[in-house]
Image (cartoon, grey):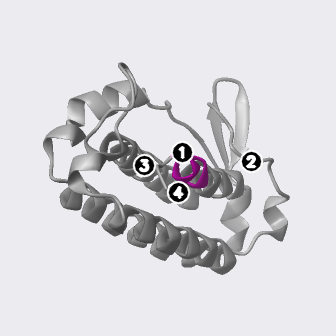
Amino acid sequence: MASYTTPSDPTALDPIALADHLRDVMATAAARFDAISAEAAAVSPAPGKWSVQQIVGHLCDSAMNNQQRIVRLALEPSIDLPGYEQEGWVRVQRYQARGWSEVVGLWLVLNRHFAHTVEGLDRTVLTHVWHYKGEALTLGFIIEDYIAHMKHHLRTLPV
């Protein structure tokens, strides 16, 4: 799994602060998305490269996969789950065939719910661990990395 941030001490993290940080990033992203026309969002920058619309679809997939990790780790101290094949998820869900506003709307709803879930977590569950390909990733790291992953993709969007 690609990491987009360095793990923090999960015992020092605050679920409310994490949710607030996500909401700030969402506000920035929503403003960026509003400035992109449906036509521009649908254009692939090069063969084999995702369009902006597909990137936002990928961020929806990330939200869905990480939402499941959050819920499962809130309920269990340790889990083993697969990752997900991002190219396949984007292909199968056909984000390019949806309307730009629909994809953005889905992204917004998923992330509002994600932030709502994070905000309500007991901070002790942030130390719970997802075991994936020999790595032990804490829930705190998963949430921080999710936000960093979103910021990474936002930096790639046209201004």
Disc 4 residue crowd, few under 14, some 14–19, many 20+, Cα 10 Å: many
Work out whether mark 2 precedes mark 1 in sequence or the reverse, and give the earlier one: 2
Instruction: Give the x, y percent position of residue 35.
Output: 36, 65
Q: Residues within 10 Å of mark 3 (few under 14, many from 20)?
A: many
Horizontal side of residue 109 vs 85, given as left or right: left
Residue to which mark 4 is pinned: 70
Mark 1 or mark 3, whichever is nearer to me:
1
Which amino acid lies under the numbered mark 3 shown in the image of this protein?
Leu
Q: Are marks 2 and 3 in contact (CB under 8 Å)?
A: no
Query: Which amino acid type is marked by label 4?
Result: Ile
**Position of residue 23 measured from the top left corner of the image (x, y, whole percent):** 53, 75
The residue lying furthest to the top in this view is: 47
The image shows residue 150, relative to residue 47, as above or below, that is below
Please say if the residues under marks 1 and 3 sit with CB atoms less than 8 Å apart. Answer: no
Query: Which of the two discs, 4 and 2, labels the residue nearer the N terminus?
Result: 2
Q: Secondary structure at mark 1?
A: loop
Pointer 1 residue: 156
User: Of circles 4 and 3, which is in front?
Assistant: 3
Residue segment shown in magenta: 151-156
Image point (70%, 42%), residue name? 137
As drawn, 57 above or below 117 = above
Q: Nearer the viewer, mark 2 or mark 1?
A: 1
Q: Which residue is denoted by mark 2 in the rendering?
A: 5
Q: Which residue is pictured at 19% across the width and 59% down the height?
A: 102
- Secondary structure mostly seen in magenta is helix
Residue at 60%, 78% in the rendered image: 20
Secondary element type, mark 2: loop
Residue at mark 4 to residue at mark 2: CA–CA distance: 18 Å
Cβ atoms at labels 4 and 2 below 8 Å apart: no
**Residue 39 part of the magenta-drawn span:** no
Q: Give the amino acid type for the residue marked by disc 1 in the picture.
A: Thr
